[in-house]
Image (tube, grey):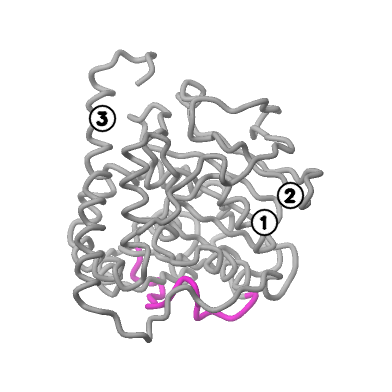
C-alpha cells in the first residue's frame, strides 16, 4: 500500500452495503501493510462493502490521552501558538498538503458561507480564502492565543473571528455552505458530538470536511499517540460521519511528501474526510451529556501533570517527521522507507 501512495493521495468513497447494521466500513488495516480484498474502480478509488470491526486492531483498555481535553488543550496551545506556524506546520501541515486536503471540500463559489472550526492561527483559513471571499469565512477556536495569530494575517482581515467550542457551535442550524475543521478533532473529548454539530450547522446539501490524524500501527508511535491525544482510525472517521447522518462519505489520504506514503507512525494531518448533509435540520443522532464539563473545577496539580505528560508525548511527533525526512534523504528513491 505504501508504494501505491508514492504518486499522490488516495480517495476512498464509502458505499453502503448489506451488513447487519446497514453500514459498511473501510478495511481495518488501512494503516498497515496491506488491505484485504479491495475492489478498486477507476478514480476516485472505491472500496465496496468491506466489513471490519473497529476493534480489529485493539487499543489499550484505558487510554490517558492527556491533551484530549479542552482545558489541557487550552494551555497546550497557550505556549504552542508562539511557534505553531514555524515549528509544527513544516513537519505536519504544509501548504501543498493543505490545498490537497481542501480539494474534496469543493470550495467552488466565492460567495459560500464557510466556518473554519478549530481554525487556530488561520493556516487552513489561508487555503480557504483562495476560493471563498474572506468576509464570508468565520474562524472559530477556543484559544484566544491562536486566534490572535490569525488576526495578524493580512488575507484574513475580513474574516469573522469567534471564540467557541467545536462541540457546541454558536451558529444557527442550516447556516453554512461548508464546514471545515483541520487539526482540531484530536482534542475533542467527544468527537462524535463535534461531527454532529458539523451536520447541524450546514445547509441542505452542504459539505463537511474534517482533516485530522491517523492511528499508527508501529508500537512506539501507538504508545505516544494514546498518551498524547486522539488519533482516530480511518474507519472510525467514516462511522462517526455516518452516525451523524452524512451521506457520500469519502476519505482522502494526505501526508508530507518525504514520508513517501508510509503511515505506520501515524500522521498528525493524515486524512481529509468529507460528507454531504442530505436533509435540513438537526442531526438524527441523539447524544447524552458532554464528556467534559468545563464548569466543574479541576485540581490544578492534576491539570499540570496531564499537561506536562501530554507535552512530552507530543515531542515524539515533532521528532518523527525529522526522522522520516532523514530517511527520505538517505534511502534511494523508489525504495520503501
Kindly indicate whether the residue at mark 3 contacts the one at mark 2 (C-beta within 8 angstroms). no
- Give the labeled residue for mark 1: 242
**Residues marked 1 and 3 touching at CB (< 8 Å):** no
Q: Which comes before the other along the chain, label 2 or label 1?
A: 2
- Element under label 3? helix
Q: State yes or no: discs 2 and 1 in contact (Cβ < 8 Å).
A: yes
Q: Which mark is residue 175?
A: none
Relative image position of residue 265 (x, y in whole percent): 36, 36
Near mark 2 (Cα within 10 A), the count class, few <14, some 14-19 or many ≥20, is some
Q: Give the x, y percent position of residue 308.
A: 19, 61
Between residue 167 and residue 278, name the one nearer to us: 167
Vertical side of 170 occupied by 135: above or below: above
Magenta: main secondary structure = loop
For mark 1, does the 10 Å Cα neighbourhood hold few (<14), some (14 to 19), or many (20 or more) residues? many
- Residue at left offset 52%, top offset 67%: 194
Magenta residue span = 155-174
Question: Picture coordinates of residue 303 (x, y %)?
Answer: 24, 72
Task: Name the foreground residue: 294 vs 43.
Answer: 294
Is 74 in the magenta? Answer: no
Q: Quote the CA–CA distance across marks 2 and 3.
A: 39 Å
Residue under pointer 2? 23
Q: Earlier in the sequence, mark 1 or mark 3?
A: 1
The 10 Å Cα crowd at callout 3, few under 14, some 14 to 19, many 20 or more, is some
Q: Which residue does the image show at 24% across and 56% down from the upper left? A: 84
Question: Does dot 1 land on a helix, a strand or a loop?
Answer: helix
> Disc 3 marks which residue?
325
**Quadrant in the picture for the C terminus:** top left
Residues under labels 1 and 3: Cα distance? 36 Å
Q: Is residue 283 above or below residue 23?
A: below
Mark 2 to mark 1 CA distance (whole Å)? 8 Å
Element type at mark 2: loop
Amino acid at each position: 500500500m505504501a508504494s501505491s501512495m508514492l504518486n499522490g493521495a488516495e480517495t476512498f468513497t464509502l458505499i453502503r452495503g448489506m451488513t447487519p447494521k446497514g453500514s459498511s466500513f473501510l478495511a481495518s488495516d488501512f494503516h498497515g501493510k496491506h488491505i484485504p480484498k479491495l475492489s478498486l474502480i477507476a478514480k476516485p478509488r472505491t472500496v465496496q462493502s468491506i466489513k471490519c470491526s473497529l476493534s480489529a486492531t485493539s487499543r489499550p483498555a484505558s487510554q490517558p490521552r492527556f491533551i484530549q481535553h479542552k482545558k489541557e488543550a487550552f494551555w497546550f496551545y497557550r505556549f504552542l501558538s508562539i511557534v505553531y506556524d514555524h515549528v509544527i506546520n513544516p513537519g505536519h501541515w504544509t501548504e501543498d498538503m493543505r490545498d490537497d486536503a481542501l480539494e474534496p471540500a469543493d470550495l467552488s463559489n466565492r460567495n459560500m458561507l464557510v466556518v473554519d472550526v478549530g481554525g487556530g492561527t488561520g493556516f487552513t483559513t489561508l487555503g480557504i480564502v483562495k476560493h471563498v471571499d474572506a468576509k464570508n469565512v468565520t474562524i472559530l477556536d477556543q484559544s484566544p492565543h491562536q486566534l490572535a495569530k490569525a488576526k495578524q494575517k493580512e488575507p484574513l482581515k475580513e474574516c469573522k473571528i469567534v471564540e467557541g467550542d467545536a462541540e457546541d457551535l454558536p451558529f444557527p442550524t442550516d447556516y453554512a455552505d461548508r464546514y471545515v475543521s483541520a487539526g482540531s478533532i484530536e482534542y475533542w473529548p467527544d468527537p462524535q458530538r463535534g461531527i454532529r454539530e458539523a451536520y447541524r450547522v450546514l445547509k441542505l446539501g452542504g459539505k463537511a470536511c474534517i482533516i485530522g490524524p491517523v492511528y499508527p500501527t508501529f508500537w512506539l508511535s501507538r504508545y505516544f499517540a494514546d498518551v498524547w491525544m486522539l488519533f482516530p482510525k480511518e474507519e472510525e472517521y467514516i462511522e462517526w460521519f455516518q452516525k451523524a447522518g452524512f451521506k457520500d462519505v469519502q476519505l482522502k489520504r494526505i501526508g508530507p511528501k518525504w514520508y513517501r506514503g508510509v503511515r505506520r507512525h501515524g500522521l498528525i494531518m493524515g486524512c481529509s474526510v468529507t460528507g454531504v448533509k442530505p436533509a435540513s435540520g438537526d442531526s438524527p443522532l441523539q447524544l447524552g451529556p458532554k464528556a467534559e464539563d468545563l464548569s466543574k473545577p479541576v485540581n490544578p496539580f492534576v491539570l499540570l501533570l496531564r499537561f506536562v505528560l501530554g507535552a512530552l508525548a507530543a515531542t515524539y511527533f515533532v521528532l518523527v517527521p525529522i526522522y522520516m525526512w532523514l530517511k527520505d534523504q538517505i534511502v534511494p528513491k523508489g525504495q520503501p522507507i
